Amino acid sequence: RGYMAITELTWLVPNPPPEVADFFGSEYPAMTDVAANLATIEERGYEVVGHFTLPSAAWWDHYYTPLEAKLPALREKYAGDDEALELVEMTAREIDMRHRFGDSYGYEFFVARVADPEASGRQALTADETPESDEGPASSGGPDAPAGGETPAEGETPTPAEAEPQARQTPEFPPPLD
């Protein structure tokens, strides 16, 4: 049985502040919490060996701190290039989110292995099968669909995990077993 290690951008609090929830609702709408990621891993036929949140230093020491120091020079260098400046400003907004709301989200490191179907009493899934719950087949809404196939009622604001993906599509997490 093989192992896999995954890091996933994850909500660390049940109700993140609206400003950071809106930011990631547009930048990474599939983002969800630790419990939902653990459930997804297990639903896909893996057994979780362990998980932990990467420390704040993993964000700052070799990534955001040196990147933030380069932003003024990048603004100057690309002063006449609106597209490049938009990217620079988006990066500055991301760094600002981390400064102000870093306790609300982080990268969770998951280690899992293929579940032993005999020990768990479950059948291993094939690539074309979808896990089923006690309430019937899983939603066909894809990896970004809310658990149980439910959608917010009309007029309700969806959570970041329920929001429709916009510019970016993420690969299925974790990949189904072959």
Image (spheres, rainbow, N blue to C red):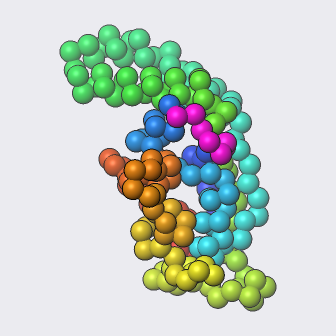
Above or below, comparing residue 137 to residue 61 in the picture: below
**Which residue is located at x 71 percent, y 71 percent?**
47
Image point 21% across, 15% down: which residue?
A: 80
Looking at the magenta stretch, what is its main secondary structure?
loop
The x and y percentages for residue 129 are: 49, 83
Q: Position of residue 48 (x, y in %)?
A: 72, 65
Region in magenta:
12-18
* Figure check: 132 above or below 111: below
Residue 70 is inside the magenta segment: no
* Residue in front for this viewpoint, 30 or 84: 30
Is 7 on the left or on the right of 80, as rendered? right
Q: Position of residue 93 (x, y in %)?
A: 45, 25
Question: Residue at horizontal 42%, vertical 68%?
Answer: 141
Count the marks: how many? 0
75 lies left or right of 123: left
Whether residue 15 is in magenta: the answer is yes
Q: Position of residue 91 (x, y in %)?
A: 43, 27
In the foreground, 116 or 169: 169
Quarter occupied by residue 90: top left
Q: Please give the name of the residue rendered at 36% of the width and 17% of the height, measured from the top-left corner.
A: 74
Residue 105 in view, yes or no: no
Residue 74 against residue 117 in the figure, above or below: above
Quadrant of the drawing holding the N terminus: bottom right
Q: Is residue 157 visible?
A: yes
Name above or below for residue 50 compared with residue 53: below
